[in-house]
Structures are given as C-alpha cells and as structure tokens.
Image (cartoon, rainbow, N blue to C red):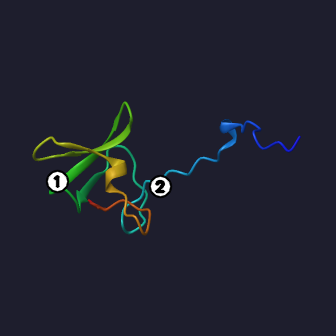
C-alpha cells in the first residue's frame, strides 16, 4: 500500500572510518614506535598491538591505554609526539 511499515536493511549502514594512526605532527606511527603521550600522565610509551587493535604501553609504569582514547576530537590525530632517535 504505502510502505509505511517496510523493513529497513540494517546491513547497508555506512561505517565511519577509523582515525588515522599518526602523531600530533602527522608523522605516521607503526607498532614498536616510542612516543611521548600528551594525555593520562603516561610519559614515554611504546605502541603495541593487542587483541582489540593497538595500545600505548607506558615504559615507566607498564600501564596500557587504547589508541582510540588518544584521538584528538578536532584533528582526528593521536595526542602523542613521536620520539625521533
């Protein structure tokens, strides 16, 4: 009739892209890179791969924080600075 109650296909929803894995200065990050975290008082961290994706592990305390918690809302970049050695 008017198709008011037509079922919608929920599988066709577009997925939002994940933020890119780059530091605040737009340098790309890879697993094993050492960075200085600008959040959560982690200090120097190492980017590691875990079951759910990536995480930053503090070199001083061993605390782990998901990389998604480090995303800057405006720039969509990570709130870390890559340590260049």
Residue at 16% in and 56% down: 43
Left/right placement of residue 2 relative to residue 49 reads: right
- Judge the density around disc 1: few (<14), some (14-19), many (≥20) Cα neighbours within 10 Å: some
Name the foreground residue: 60 vs 65: 65
* Quadrant containing the N terminus in the rendered view: top right
Asked which quadrant contains residue 12, the reply is top right
Q: What SS does tag 2 mark?
A: loop
Residue at 37% in and 63% down: 72
Residue labelled with disc 2: 19
Going from the N terminus, do you reach mark 1 or mark 2 first?
Answer: 2
Name the foreground residue: 9 vs 41: 9
Position of residue 41 relative to residue 52, above or below, is: below
- Judge the density around disc 2: few (<14), some (14-19), many (≥20) Cα neighbours within 10 Å: some
Which residue extends farthest front? 1
What x and y, as percent, mark residue 51? 37, 30
Which residue extends farthest right? 1
What x and y, as percent, mark residue 82? 31, 60
Q: Are marks 1 and 2 in contact (CB under 8 Å)?
A: no
Asked which quadrant contains residue 78, the reply is bottom left
Name the foreground residue: 19 vs 6: 6
Position of residue 57 relative to residue 83, above or below, is: above
Left/right placement of residue 81 relative to residue 10 reads: left
Position of residue 69 relative to residue 24, above or below, is: above
Residue labelled with disc 1: 42
């Amino acid at each position: 009739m008017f198709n008011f109650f037509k079922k919608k296909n929920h599988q066709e929803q577009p997925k939002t892209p994940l933020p890119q894995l780059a530091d605040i200065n737009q340098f790309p990050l890879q697993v094993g890179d050492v960075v200085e975290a600008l959040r959560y008082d982690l200090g120097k961290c190492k980017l590691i791969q875990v079951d759910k994706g990536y995480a930053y592990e503090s070199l001083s305390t061993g605390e782990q924080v998901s990389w998604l918690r480090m995303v800057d809302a405006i720039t969509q970049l990570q709130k870390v600075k890559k340590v260049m050695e």
